[in-house]
Image (cartoon, rainbow, N blue to C red):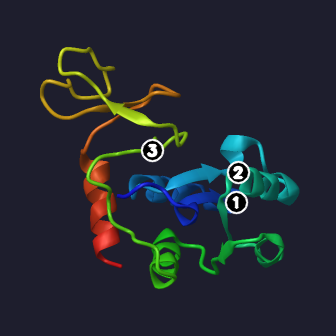
Amino acid sequence: MPENTASDRLVLDAMLGKLATYLRMCGYDTAYALDRDAEADDDLLAIAAREDRRVVTRDSDLAARASESVLLTEREIDEQLRELADAGFRLSLAPEPAHCGVCNGPVEQVDPVEPTPEYAPTADDEQVWRCTDCGQHFWKGSHWAAVKATLEDL
């Protein structure tokens, strides 16, 4: 994915936590309201303005107040993804993770000689990435394959 533009920098309201993970896996720099203690609309709008982010929400009042927003109507993740695809969002997995699915922090590849947590494969067996903010480890396992299949079905 090329350098992030303002349209690639998103902030999602509290109703869209699962969607935040999908967008991060697609390479979008995606802030999530509950990660930022920003449940109040004014707090979310302040983040959007301060960090040049587009608001993605299911709240029509919030969407109307944002300088740039995407209003979703659907509740189910597949349908939300379809709405975003219809709005012109590129929804395919990034070749390598760039953003932590948990906290949106940057990720780096783990050196094959470095140890990994018990829940992760060893880095000499397959590529593993680590979030530089929260320490979560990622690899292209069954979750990656499931998300890829979901995105291909859009």
Is 52 placed left or right of 94 in the picture?
right
Q: Estimate the x, y position of residue 114 in percent, counting from the top left.
A: 25, 15
Identified at 67% across, 57% down, the residue is 52
Looking at the rendering, in which quadrant would you find the N terminus?
A: bottom left
Dot 2, how many residues are within 10 Å of its Cα: few (below 14), some (14-19), or many (20+)?
many
Q: Estimate the x, y position of residue 86 in percent, counting from the top left.
A: 47, 85
Identified at 39% across, 58% down, the residue is 26
Contact, CB < 8 Å: mark 1 with mark 2? yes
Is 86 placed left or right of 43 in the picture?
left
In the rendered image of this protein, does residue 42 appear above or below residue 113? below
SS under mark 2: helix
Which residue, given by chain and number where applicable, does mark 1 sit on?
Answer: 13
In the rendered image of this protein, does residue 97 appear above or below residue 27? above
Which residue, given by chain and number where applicable, does mark 3 sit on?
Answer: 99
Amino acid type of the residue that numbered disc 1 sits on in the rendered structure: Asp
Report how far apart the C-alphas of labels 1 and 3 lie in the structure: 18 Å
Identified at 70% across, 47% down, the residue is 34
SS under mark 3: loop
